[in-house]
């Protein structure tokens, strides 16, 4: 592919965020050297770091830089230091997702043989799992009107046809590149928003993606099937709150939370890429954080925002080789720190080329 230049905003955030964000930059710089691309990184404030510096969790200047970028890499936000503070670090995260119009949150999970024995589930159940969750991220009950009186409270769940259509299309398109199956999760036996969800997904499937296999599942039985037969799933499509809950359930199948990446994508603008873990205050600043979740998030950025498939494949192959070799951090029972684990990934990328 032709050499290109990319303007990447890095939001290191709090706790282990800066440590893993640096790891991703090192890996991307190596990819840039090999393939002849230029990755320009510009750091901006978010979360607790921004609260300490300027008194708000998402400064205007950060928001503008993200919107003007080619893509955003985020470490993590939050920590006990800001518990009970009037402004919370996590508000910055919700605000940037909304400001960038990131309506689809993607969380892939692959369980290789070397990781399967670290799972709390039996190796025979999880080995070979290869799925991706598409969670709607900017609507539903998390964004509906809230009320509170002395004796009652309410949270309103609203979905429009258009909000369902766009995330459904993203999931069907992903299934075309994978094993060709979408499982749409709802609660259509009870909720009206779920009945609309099921109708719209069924129509988009029939009109635009008839070659994909579509199945519908109720969220409660899905929670059960995910731990009994996780290998049955390819693309899982769901609304905001169900996706929040199911993706945490799925995250434990594979061994360590430090391994898992995510991508949040909007219509045409830049995407945001972050590991699924938080700021891990218990291990922050000690060179203990596993950089893999952040590094694989950078690979998702190359694939989804920049269409650099070979480059993304290189990172993923290098990570797989390093995990298989046992050159891993303490959360996986290894002896490496963040810096040396990152170096092992960089060396593995060079070894492939
Ligand atoms: P957490 O994900 O930060 O940590 C949970 C456990 O996993 C801890 O024992 C931690 O040491 C470990 N862990 C996390 N990332 C790791 C890594 N890369 N390598 C090795 N071990 C790792 O979740 P927790 O403790 O519930 O939240 C801590 C803070 O992070 C809170 O303030 C929370 O609000 C915030 N948070 C932020 C998120 C984000 O920025 N997207 C997501 C989740 C939580
Ligand atoms: Mg969650």
Image (cartoon, rainbow, N blue to C red):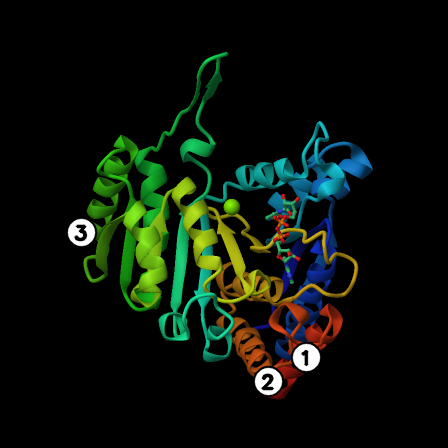
Q: Residues within 10 Å of mark 1 (few under 14, many from 20)?
A: many
Helix, strand or loop at mark 1: helix
Give the number of the disc on residue 325. 2
Residue on which disc 1 sits: 344
Indicate which label's residue lies in the foreground, 1 or 3. 1
Quadrant housing residue 341: bottom right
Q: Residues under labels 3 and 2: Cα distance?
A: 45 Å
Indicate if the residue with disc 1 has its beta carbon within 8 Å of ligand 1.
no
Q: Residues within 10 Å of mark 3 (few under 14, many from 20)?
A: few
- Sequence order check, earlier mark of 1 and 2: 2
Q: Is residue 353 visible?
A: no
Q: Is residue 93 left or right of residue 136?
A: right
**Picture residue at 58% right of the left edge, 86% below the top:** 352
- On residue 206, which mark appears? 3
**Is residue 42 placed above or below 86 in the rendered structure?**
below
Q: What's the distance in space between the residues labelled 1 and 2, CA to CA?
A: 10 Å
- Disc 2 Cβ-to-ligand 1 distance below 8 Å: no
Residue 221 vertical position relative to residue 114 in the rendered view, above or below: above
Mark 1–mark 3 Cα distance, whole angstroms, equals 47 Å
Residue shown at 32%/62% (left/top)? 228
Disc with the residue nearer the chain's start (1 vs 3): 3
Q: Quadrant of the C terminus?
A: bottom right
Instruction: Identify the residue at horizontal 40%, vertical 60% (top origin).
Output: 132
Mark 3 vs 2, N-terminal side: 3
């Amino acid at each position: 592919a032709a050499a290109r230049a990319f303007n990447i905003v890095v939001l290191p955030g709090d706790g282990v965020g800066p440590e893993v964000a640096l790891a991703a930059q090192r890996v991307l710089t190596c990819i840039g050297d090999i393939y002849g691309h230029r990755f320009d990184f510009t750091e901006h404030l978010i979360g607790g770091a921004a609260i300490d510096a300027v008194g708000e969790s998402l400064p205007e200047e950060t928001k503008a830089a993200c919107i003007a970028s080619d893509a955003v890499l985020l470490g993590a936000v939050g920590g006990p230091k800001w518990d009970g503070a009037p402004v919370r670090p996590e508000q910055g995260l919700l605000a940037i997702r909304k400001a960038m119009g990131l309506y689809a949150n993607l969380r892939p999970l692959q369980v290789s043989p070397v990781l399967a024995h670290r799972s709390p589930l039996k190796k025979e159940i999880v080995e070979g799992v290869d799925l991706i969750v598409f969670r709607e991220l900017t609507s539903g009950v998390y964004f509906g009107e809230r009320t509170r009186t002395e004796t009652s409270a309410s949270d309103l769940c609203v979905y429009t046809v258009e909000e369902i259509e766009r995330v459904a299309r993203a999931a069907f398109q992903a299934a075309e590149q994978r094993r060709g199956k979408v499982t749409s999760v709802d609660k259509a036996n009870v909720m009206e928003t779920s009945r609309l969800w099921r109708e719209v997904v069924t129509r988009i499937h029939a009109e635009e993606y008839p070659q994909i296999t579509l199945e519908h599942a109720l969220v409660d039985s899905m929670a059960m099937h995910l731990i009994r037969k996780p290998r049955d799933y390819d693309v899982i499509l769901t609304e905001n709150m169900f996706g929040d809950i199911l993706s945490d359930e799925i995250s434990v199948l594979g061994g360590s939370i430090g391994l898992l990446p995510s991508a949040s994508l909007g219509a045409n603008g830049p995407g945001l890429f972050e590991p699924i873990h938080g700021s891990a205050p218990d291990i922050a600043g000690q060179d203990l954080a596993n950089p893999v979740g952040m590094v694989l998030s950078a690979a998702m950025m190359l694939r989804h925002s920049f269409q650099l498939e070979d480059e993304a494949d290189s990172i993923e192959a290098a990570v797989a080789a390093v995990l298989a070799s046992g050159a891993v951090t303490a959360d996986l029972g290894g002896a490496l720190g963040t810096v040396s684990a990152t170096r092992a990934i960089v060396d593995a990328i060079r070894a492939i080329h």
